[in-house]
Image (spheres, grey):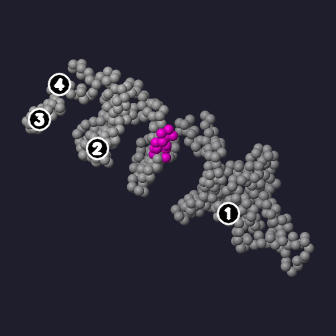
Amino acid sequence: MEFIKEEREDVKIEETLSVKHEDTEEQTDLMALKEESYEHNVKEEKDQYGNDHDFLSGETSFSCSQTEKTSSQEKAQKKRTSFNQQDHMRIHTGESPFRCQQCGKRFTHKVSFKRHMRIHTGEKPYTCKLCGKSFNRKGHLNNHMRIHTGEKSSISHQHVKSLDQDENLKVHMRIHTGESPFTCQQCGNGFTEKGSLNRHMRTHNGEKPYTCQQCGKSFSQHGSLKIHMRIHTGEKPYICQCGKSFDQEGNLKVHMRIHTGESPFTCQQCGNRFTQRGSFNRHMRIHTGEKPFTCPQCGKSFNRKGNFNYHMRVHTGEKPYTCQQCGNRFTEKGSLTRHIRIHKGEKPYKCPQCGKGFSQHGSLKNHIRIHTGEKPFTCPQCGKSFEKDWNLKVHIRIHKGEKPYTCPQCEKSFSKQGSLKIHIRIHTGEKPFTCPQCGKSFDQDANLKVHMRIHTGESPFTCQQCGKTFTLKGSFNRHMRIHSGEKPFTCQRCGKSFNRKGNLNYHMRVHTG
């Protein structure tokens, strides 16, 4: 009876390794499973060690060295009986010679070890011939067959109940009493069942005994492995009424909130509601100011892991997103998506006033300000306003005298990166912008646009006072000084003023000779 108890305990420990909600076939009829386990354990041990060992009665006919006979039949009997004695002695010695190479768990009996290995391999050798469902234990298949046959176990429910009812009742009562007798020595968390503690300990020791045979990824829980396997199989067993499928029940539950409108997570500070706990937790960091993700290299902190991962690429130089057409690489997937629109010519963002299209939403927002005249970015030092945040940042450098972009050839510095790029073309002689009509080339795109007005006859700048038109904004500004009388160029020697810089330069010759 001791032997049976040990074997049943071994089976029980194995089964706690699986996530409870995943093993539905084992939970459908708990009492029937216990009956089968009781029958099956006795049968398996008899099959392994021979019928001459009476496990139920505890009677064992171990051979005596003083009364051995020499016939071949009796020698075989002696060998089998001697093996049973050796196996039985492990109960007293505590010897567990069968060790799992994947998780390190040890077993006293080979049959227990074989059953355990099926957890890692995912092997289910026992298949129902009626519905095709497979099981990793013969007892579970026998139990399942009763669904088809309607057969009831020969062992009474009352008898099976008596085997474990005291222990099961104790565990159940902990739900009501709140008792958690199994405590983690590392973090102090308490658990109602030893199996739960064992699973929790894998968090600390990093143990991942369940390994995917296809990609080699390991998991701490059997249920996690089962979910992972659906990536390879493509199985999505949880189906919504709208037809969308999911590989996890939890994902289906979250999806259902789209149809029901349920938002169970409410912020107590601002009233915002969320369908997912993760979204709610991220939102709460806005109020608390918590930034749990800290860069180990520069100490900068972030309230989202995604932002932290993106920041780390600044240090590593990693650009995992590559354009397949031109080879340009990007740190963010969104940047690649926007870049692809250049190749496709896609401009999904349309101005509602003039119909102009843009490849980026931010570009449309900036464009809208041309129509509204909005300039929301104001310099705190001089009060000048700008349509774009970036323009303000560049402007601030004028006050600071900051010129961070330096030419490597002549060491001239610039406040804008674009200005440096244009300047470099002086050294290289590069003129990448070519007129398609006359072939003339320019070092700046703006200069080509102005040149094109010669061919088109376009004069977009019109004087409101006299109606004269101009192709260049500079020419228009100089003309307007005629009407306004403005003379911004003043001689530092005699104080005389002029409306054009060229006129001032000509005047200076009077003083210089």
| Kind of residue sitting beneath label 4 | Ile
Q: Mark 3 — residue? A: 509
Residue 508 location (% of width, % of height): 12, 35
Q: Are marks 1 and 3 in contact (CB under 8 Å)?
A: no
Nearest to viewer (mark 3 / mark 4):
3
Say which label, 3 or 4, has the lower sequence index.
4
Residue 97 location (% of width, % of height): 71, 69
Q: Mark 4 — residue? A: 482
Helix, strand or loop for the magenta stretch, by majority: loop
**435 in the magenta segment:** no
Say which label, 1 or 3, has the lower sequence index.
1
At a point 27% along the width and 43% down the height, the residue shown is 396
**Quadrant of the frame with the C terminus:** top left
At a point 82% along the width and 54% down the height, the residue shown is 154
At a point 24% along the width and 29% down the height, the residue shown is 474
Picture quarter containing residue 8? bottom right
Say which label, 2 or 3, has the lower sequence index.
2
Separation of residues labelled 4 and 2 (CA atoms): 33 Å
| Kind of residue sitting beneath label 1 | Cys
Nearest to viewer (mark 2 / mark 1):
2
Residue 164 location (% of width, % of height): 71, 60
Residue 422 location (% of width, % of height): 32, 39
Q: Mark 2 — residue? A: 414
Picture quarter containing residue 176? bottom right
Q: Mark 1 — residue? A: 100
| Kind of residue sitting beneath label 3 | Arg
Separation of residues labelled 3 and 4 (CA atoms): 24 Å
In this picture, residue 94 sits left or right of residue 448: right
49 lies above or below 501: below
Separation of residues labelled 2 and 3 (CA atoms): 31 Å
Say which label, 4 or 2, has the lower sequence index.
2
Q: Are marks 4 and 2 in contact (CB under 8 Å)?
A: no
